[in-house]
Image (cartoon, rainbow, N blue to C red):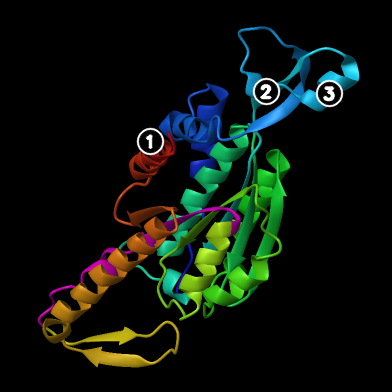
């Protein structure tokens, strides 16, 4: 039986101490910089002067007031971010000390903290082939602890995954002004996934963060037969690693290339994380790269 060690307390304490001293690290800075200036909100009017951009003149308001008026625009800062978390069977795997879902839960807790600390709102959807927990986007400390409680609940983990079912279920819930980040190992994709992801990306901003265990990418070169289990059918197989390794490694790289190319094709961000490495540095670089692309 798999034992989930979903103890987020050390991470929470570390984040709270960082916030208390206003040193929440590079991720917060890059997150703020990434989304800075992505949109403008209307604030009001003022009288036009010759140095103003004439495109900001509101002719209807000017006619009503008998004076040339320009729109005052302010930077749109308040964002709504939805974190979609795959908690299916394949995420309950590890060849090292930490399961993929444990690593992902720590990442999500950190992202939620950064988003809320930046003054934005965040929501969480935990899913398998159905939505097992849905916390709508909101702000504040209560929202953060609701997310932490969900991430720490072992009863919400495990099950067969169907990505297309989830994307269809959320199609009406996700609004155009939202940003969606999918956190998954992206193992077991169904045939409709690509088309629905493209449709999703046409509606809102979307990014994918792939969580992989070292064995997901490279099959161990063992010189003895091993027993492996299919997380989707529960079937078990005895395999000879030296026979399957080359094909397995090739398929793993092909899937990575496919996913990276798919997200690039729909002009969306994609980050590949390995559970054997810390996530702060690659996530910070991911935000930096996305910011450069939007300049």
* Percent of width and height locating residue 126: 59, 64
Q: Are marks 3 and 2 in contact (CB under 8 Å)?
A: no
| Res. 181 in view | yes
Q: Pick out the residue farthest to the top.
A: 50
Count residues near mark 3 (Cα–Cα under 10 Å), then give few for <14, some for 14-19, many for 20+. Answer: some
Q: Which mark is nearer the camera, 3 or 1?
A: 3
Count residues near mark 1 (Cα–Cα under 10 Å), then give few for <14, some for 14-19, many for 20+. Answer: few
* Percent of width and height locating residue 35: 53, 35
Classify the position of the C terminus by image quarter: top left
Left or right, residue 243 beside residue 155:
left
- Name the element at disc 3: helix
Residue with the mark numbered 1: 292
Between the C-alphas of marks 3 and 1, the distance is 37 Å
Between the C-alphas of marks 1 and 2, the distance is 27 Å
Classify residue 98 by image quadrant: bottom left
Residue with the mark numbered 3: 61
Q: Which mark is nearer the camera, 1 or 2?
A: 2
Q: Earlier in the sequence, mark 3 or mark 2?
A: 2
Residue stretch rendered in magenta on the structure? 203-223
Q: 86 or 109: nearer the eye? A: 86
């Amino acid at each position: 039986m798999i034992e989930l060690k979903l103890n987020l307390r050390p991470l929470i304490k570390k984040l709270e101490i960082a916030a208390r001293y206003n040193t929440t690290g590079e991720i917060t800075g890059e997150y703020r910089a990434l989304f800075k200036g992505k949109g403008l909100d209307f604030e009001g009017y003022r009288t036009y002067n010759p140095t103003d951009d004439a495109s900001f003149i509101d002719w209807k308001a000017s006619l009503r007031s008998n004076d040339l008026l320009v729109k005052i625009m302010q930077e749109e800062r308040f964002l709504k971010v939805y974190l979609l978390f795959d908690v299916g069977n394949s995420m309950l795997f590890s060849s090292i000390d930490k399961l993929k879902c444990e690593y992902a839960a720590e990442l999500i807790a950190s992202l939620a903290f950064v988003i809320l600390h930046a003054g934005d709102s965040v929501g969480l959807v935990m899913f398998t082939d159905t939505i097992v927990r849905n916390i709508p986007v909101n702000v504040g400390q209560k929202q953060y602890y609701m997310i932490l409680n969900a991430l720490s609940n072992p009863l919400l983990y495990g099950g067969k995954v169907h990505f297309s079912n989830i994307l269809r279920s959320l199609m009406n819930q996700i609004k155009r002004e939202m940003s969606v980040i999918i956190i998954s190992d992206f193992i077991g994709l169904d045939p409709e996934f690509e088309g629905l992801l493209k449709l999703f990306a046409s509606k809102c901003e979307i990014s994918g963060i792939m969580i992989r265990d070292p064995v997901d990418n490279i099959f161990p070169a063992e010189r003895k037969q091993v027993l492996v289990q299919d997380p989707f059918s529960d079937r078990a197989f005895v395999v000879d690693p030296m026979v399957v390794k080359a094909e397995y490694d090739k398929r793993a790289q092909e899937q990575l290339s496919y996913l990276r190319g798919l997200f690039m094709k729909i002009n969306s961000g994609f980050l590949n994380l390995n559970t054997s490495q810390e996530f702060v540095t690659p996530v910070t670089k991911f935000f930096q790269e996305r910011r450069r692309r939007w300049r």
